[in-house]
Amino acid sequence: MQARMMNTKPYSQLTAMLAISRASFRSITRSPSAVVFTLAFPLVFILVFGFIGGGAFTVHVAVKKECDRNNPVYQALLQNNVVKLDTTLTPEEMQGSLEKGRIDATLTIVKLPEGSMPQYDVLVETTSASRDMGAVLKSVLNNIFYTVNSAHVKMPTYAELKETEVHVREYRRIDFILPGQLGFSLLSSGVFGTAFVFYNLRQTLVIKRFFATPIRRPFIVLGEALSRLVFALIGAVIIIVLGHFAFGFTLIHGIATVASMLLLSALGLIVFMGFGFVVSGLAKNESAIPPIANIITLPQFLLSGTFFPITVFPLWLQPICNVLPLTYLNDALRKVAFEGASLFSVGHQVGIVALWGIVVYAAAIKFFRWE
């Protein structure tokens, strides 16, 4: 008896946590809803948008400071629903945005000396990555020229278009869609997965059984969190690799870019799991979980730049878009993948997501119930 007691190893919280993680991971892989939300839905959207191709429906044009704005061409552009003019960018921001695909063109309208024909030169700078949008802009301008020239019968050529093209990396639709679908996957897994798992563990008295063992509560949470993190990151790798090799998703620094995207994904999932803890604490029964979770997830799916740029929404709605955590996660993922931004460069986005994490976990501590 004494020899047996001497050979008894001390209880390891880490070993117990890893055992919970392994069991939880097997449970996740056998859950149809987890597979659907983490992999199936995002992959379907990536396949659909990948095969569709094409670009956006709005031509984003930055207006240079020296642009003459007191002429009918500029006023007609202001009234056009296809062209969106941005007058807020500095020359440095304008050039960077043009090269990185954030805008489609720049515009300068120069008034020529009195008596000249034409009276205005319209200088447009487009990129090789947005030729389709450049063609749309030229078509819009030619229609405006026709209307303006018709109104000035004494001057048949009131304004003339002069175009230059900057050769940059092509910005494909998949470069916008894939990070959004990755964010979609992380939010779904973090909120729905965590809420259902902890509610069911509580209802089936599994957590109560854990309490009969020496394992401490934080390690129970860490064990479940680790399994969900591993599963979500495996899904993220599959999404990124499929997008890159099947549709040419841009990974500007290769493996280093993938690693940065996975770190951002891990941060996003940890924050979104906090929402799941809040939902599991608020839900009085299992049927209450989907409505509460949808209140959190649906606005982010629709308004966080998952499917469309937030600039397509009305101006009154954009401030709401700009406070949602998924907006900043999507933005950081796109900048890291396409622009080659470092994690330090997207520190603003990371900080906002982390701030959301602090707020959400403060709420989770208040609402989460063990029994």
Image (cartoon, grey):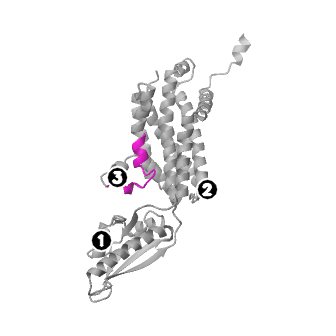
Q: Which residues are magenta?
A: 297-314
Residue 90 higher or lower than 327, as above or below: below
Q: Position of residue 39 (x, y in %)?
A: 56, 43
| Residue contact between numbered discs 2 and 1, judged by CB atoms under 8 Å | no
Q: Earlier in the sequence, mark 2 or mark 1?
A: 1
- Name the residue located 50 percent from the left edge and 33 percent from the top edge: 194
Under tag 1, what secondary structure?
Answer: helix
- Name the residue located 55 percent from the left edge and 31 percent from the top edge: 224
The disc at residue 296 is: none
Residue that mark 2 sits on: 246
Instruction: Please state which amino acid type lies under the numbered disc 3.
Output: Gln
Under tag 3, what secondary structure?
Answer: helix
The disc at residue 76 is: 1
Residue 209: in magenta span: no
Question: Within the image, what quadrant is residue 106 found in?
Answer: bottom left
Residue that mark 3 sits on: 318
Label 1 and label 3: CA atoms lie apart by: 25 Å
Q: Earlier in the sequence, mark 3 or mark 2?
A: 2
Badge 2, how many Cα within 10 Å: few under 14, some, many 20+?
A: few
Instruction: Please state which amino acid type lies under the numbered disc 1.
Output: Ala
Label 2 and label 1: CA atoms lie apart by: 42 Å
Q: Position of residue 42 (x, y in %)?
A: 53, 46
Under tag 2, what secondary structure?
Answer: helix
Query: Is residue 55 in view?
Result: yes
Label 3 and label 2: CA atoms lie apart by: 33 Å
Left/right placement of residue 154 relative to residue 254 reads: left
